[in-house]
Image (cartoon, rainbow, N blue to C red):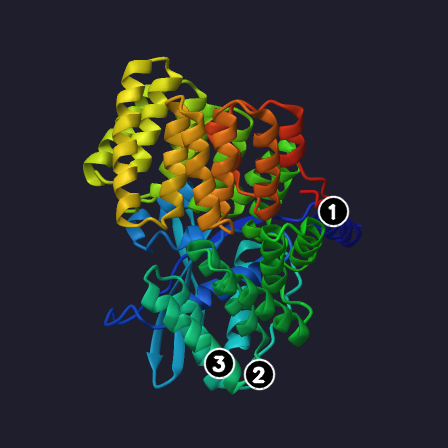
Amino acid sequence: MVLLALAAIIILWKTYDWVFPKHASIAILRFTHSTNETNDLDLLDALPILLAEDFTRCDHITVIAPSSSFLYTSDPIHLRKIASNLQVEYLLVGTIQENDGRYSIQLNLLTPDEEKTTNIGTVEGSLSTLSEMRITILQKVLDKTGVRSDLPVISQPANTEALAKYLRGIHLMRQKSGMEVDSARELLQTAIQIDPSLCIAYGSLADLQIRTFQTMDDPQFLQSATEYAQRALRCSPNNALAYQVLATSNRLSQNYYSALSSINQSMALLPQNPECYRELALLSLIARKFDEATSYASSALLYDPKNVESHFTLGLIQQMKQDYFGAENSYQQAQLPGDNNLMLMAYYVQNVWIGEGNYDKVVRYCSQMIRISPENYRYYYWTGRAYQLSLQISTAQEWLKKGLKITEQVIDDDPNDAIAHTYAGLIYSRLGKFPEGEAAMNKAMQLDSSSVEVVFRNADLYSIQRNKQKAIAALQKAVQRQYDFAEILNPDLSFIALDPEFLSIVTQKIDGQWPVK
């Protein structure tokens, strides 16, 4: 009877564990070097990045993305606070000792609730056994946390020289400077030259190129990103990063059905990718699905809580929903210390202030920027616009006239400056000089009709002049060229912003299956 009872208990326990499996959340911090002689050992970044992806392929594990976890150093004094900030149950930290290509990695797992750090063992190997090292680390962590999961299949690249170039490349991709990003690109390209079957390098190159495009707005990088992503998938159809890049590329090219399809394929392979959730949130905004956008943005914050892009995406949703208090708070969290954040402040935050009628904040911000850049006509225009919207007409005219004077000087120095001509057109229009404004804008269109900014400014001008028909027609041309959230939220379009035709233009029907969280 005792044996039967014991067997029944074991069966019940196993059944309970199968029906209600244990879940855990974990963040992997950047590993440290045992000698402290250098922080430039590639595996300090590369191995935790690879492990974070490995853990997302395990069942019942929630993993914080390296873009958030790498913001912290593994200082023993602050580990509990780090876990609290990232809202995880466990922190994995490692110390690497390297000796002539051989690595010894001591692993520690912090359990903040128990205020305990546990040494879970040492893993040894070389680049030629990197996949085995990763599998061993996964097993040790799963055993210690009590999470039951099958282990993912991790392939081992055949050429260790190519693998070393790849690891160095993804290490340098984390850096902000252009030189290191260029070096990362060269290393990844060298890696696939050495070993054309190194599929993961194609995906990383695609990711690097799409990020460069978003910074530099050079179409060649967008095209290159697409080509590398396609090559990655020809090499291996299970490259989640390649599908993610294709999703972004297709969204930017307004191929929304393909973007949604690529996201589905990426998430089937890597369901915790915060970049996919951010992409889904942006697609939802384009489709005017605000509730879905909020849900996707919340998932991005769950997996990547300290990434400024997660907070920016949520702020954009809140701004479009006219939750200006929430948007301002999210945008504030999207600003990194030391960054100038000019784009965020100029094209999003000040428009939030205008939306909530806080024109004094706009004036103070622009005044501060004028002291830094006294020749930037945009700040004079935005100041004049803020005063005009607050019905301080005479003060508005003073600032607009100052801005016009500076703009005309810029045009005198460079008559082919199309953007300066567009702002001259906007200023003339706000001063009530519609023919002069239209003439200036027509000149800008003659100089550079291919510029997305020029085409959007053209729509702004006709909205300011309250010419609905021309404003709508110009906006439609602009949106067909590029779907730009900042431009669509521009207060200069306020005259048509509530018009059904405006909403029809900025709302895109996106067919396909939307992932459910």
Q: Secondary structure at mark 2?
A: loop
- Say above or below: 41 vs 476: below
Q: Earlier in the sequence, mark 2 or mark 1?
A: 1
Q: Secondary structure at mark 1?
A: helix
The alpha-carbon separation of the residues under discs 1 and 3 comes to 45 Å
> Is 245 situated left or right of 213 in this image?
right
- Say above or below: 16 vs 289: below
Amino acid tagged 1: Val
Q: Secondary structure at mark 3?
A: helix
Q: Which residue is mark 1?
A: 19
> Is 252 situated left or right of 125 in this image?
right
Q: Which residue is mark 2?
A: 196
Q: Residue at x 36, y 52 (%)?
A: 71
Horizontal and vertical percent position of residue 351: 42, 29
Q: Are marks 2 and 1 in contact (CB under 8 Å)?
A: no
The alpha-carbon separation of the residues under discs 2 and 1 comes to 44 Å
Q: Earlier in the sequence, mark 1 or mark 3?
A: 1
